[in-house]
Image: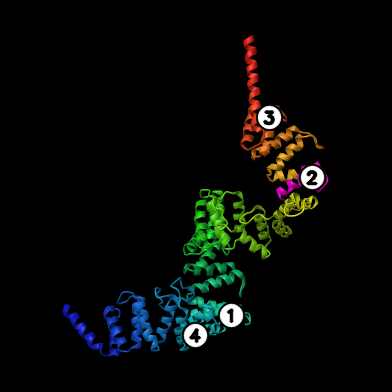
Amino acid sequence: MIGLNIVYKVLDRLVARSPKRARARAERLSNVAPERALALFVAAAEAGDTEAAFIVGERYLEGKGALQHPVSAARWYQAAAEAGHVGAQCRLAALHLFGVTKSAVADERLFEASESETPDYHAAMVWAKRAAEAGAPDAQAMLAFILSSGPESLRDSDAAFDWYRKAAAQDCPQGRLGYAIALMLRSDIADNMLIARNELLRASEGGLATAHYLLGAAAEGGFGTALDEAEARRFYTLAAEAQHTAAQLKLGLMLLDGRGGPADALNGESWLRRAAVAGDSEAAMHLGELYSRGGALPPNYIEAVHWFRTAAERGHQAAARTLGMFYLTGAGVARDPDEAAAWFKRAAEAGDTVAQADLATLLQTGAVSNTDNESFPVHEWFERAAEQGDLIGAFNYAVCLAEGIGVPRNDARAAFWLRKAADEVVSAQYWYGRMLADGRGLDRNDGEAAAWFESAADAGMADAQFALGEFYLQGRGVSYDPEAAKARFLSAARAGHSGAMFALGILHGEETELATDHGEARLWFGRAAEQGHAAAALMLARYAAQGLGGPKDIETARRWYERASSLGAANAAEELAALNSERTGKADAVAEEELMA
């Protein structure tokens, strides 16, 4: 065997003296002795054989006859390309475009390239243009891609369109796909959508997943063809099975919703999961929603939090906001207002106005530990939104000004922005009414305040209904009218407003134009007290101690006095002490009588 190897080496050395013979022998040995074949190809290439240089590049890129080494491949491609080898020029352009760490072999698809090293569009364009002008359809499609999707300085949509058309005319699948996309973006060509669909069909015959995906989107939306969800589902399936992430998302949603065929929750979830694992933030967001709301699949808040976090970490605004709500409510995670604020902030900084409002509300409660202006510049977001005409932003900025959140308190500016927002924002109507009623930032005007309260109350806002009820009882800005006050208090109480419940207790228990009903009063005091209303707890204790509206019950009275005292009700502790003293005195008197007897 050793002797035979020596013979082979001698033969190879002799053949290598002729580049043509060396390449021919290398091709014969290619499959049986790849290492010897590579050495012969190198010898031929070094002797000036351009095709051999290209083949050496291919071998190093594929790792055939030597360890895979893309950088060496690029060096040999460069030598062949400079000598005019069109295939090497195409390959070199692809390497510059997709990166040397990706195997830019023949089946690499331009529109389906995965993430790679930072593309060198300028170098890629040099070689793609040479090969394109030599008539290579793959290079023409690549050049068109650079001209349409590369850096702004290189873009030329008209030239890109022409190159795509030339590549498509040579039946290049990538060219047909690019030509179809370019057609869909133009309106100056008659029947552009119909022509584009035909090009997509031809591109799909070449196995391009993106073509299948776009055909699915066309069928789903009725673009260039009749709306056909069954056909859309078929094309999405083809693309999804070819690892097209956007198609996996679309297919998952269609399966979950039962569009284009029977519903299939398990496979729908599976396709969404594949897309999410592949990096699609929208798919991760949908998985979070799927597991949080339940339905076809049982709710699972821990799973939902995982997918919302996955989407949020990839920059999905709504997912970050939703994750903040999970931390705020403690669903699927330990309740953590600081963590909630951090996720609200992430969404808010990305421009999510709902998250900005949620963050502002959270900060107002004082539940967040770190509330410095630099960490949560909510006032800056709201000020920009307000100045751009966003009325929700105007309202939130006004609240910041009125409460001194992130900025010094400024009642006049708060009133200015509240008035702007009040034309459409119900909460702003109520707040502006309060400013008018209190004379904050503008002159006090009870009549105008009542009108704004009424506007917000009629829209269903409980705070405004309560405020308007108080105005009717006080005759401020409106005529004194206990019946009207009662109606407004009832509306607010049904919405859970504890202050309105307490007010109804007072209306029924005090001497007013309304009939006194201590039983009804005790009922309303009880409802308000259960919600933590300090004054209501005190009144309930008094009613129980005196037997008003129900049986006299000293133990119940004591319990509500203690509750009222813990809630900060004035006089509750003193009245409880008096109640205990009275009871002790009575007990002593009874004991003395029994002793005397």
Question: At x 70% / y 44%, what residue is drawn?
Answer: 494
Identify the residue position indicated by label 1 in the image: 195
- Which quadrant of the figure contains the C terminus? top right
Which numbered dot is residue 472? Answer: 2
Disc 3 and disc 4 in contact, CB within 8 angstroms: no
Distance from disc 1 to disc 3, alpha carbons, whole Å, reads: 84 Å
**Disc 3 marks which amino acid?**
Ala
Magenta-colored stretch includes residue 473: yes
**Is residue 298 in view from this perspective?**
no
Number of residues whose C-alpha sits closer than 10 Å to that of mark 1, classed few (under 14), some (14–19) or many (20 or more): some
Question: At x 69% / y 46%, what residue is drawn?
Answer: 495
Looking at marks 4 and 2 on the same chain, the residue that comes earlier in the sequence is marked by 4
| x and y, in percent, of residue 101 in the image | 39, 73
Looking at marks 3 and 4 on the same chain, the residue that comes earlier in the sequence is marked by 4
Question: For the magenta stretch, what is the residue range?
Answer: 459-486
**Disc 2 marks which amino acid?**
Tyr
**Disc 4 marks which amino acid?**
Gln
Q: Nearer the viewer, residue 307 or 373?
A: 373
Q: Where is 151 relative to 334, above or below?
A: below
Question: At x 18% / y 80%, what residue is drawn?
Answer: 4
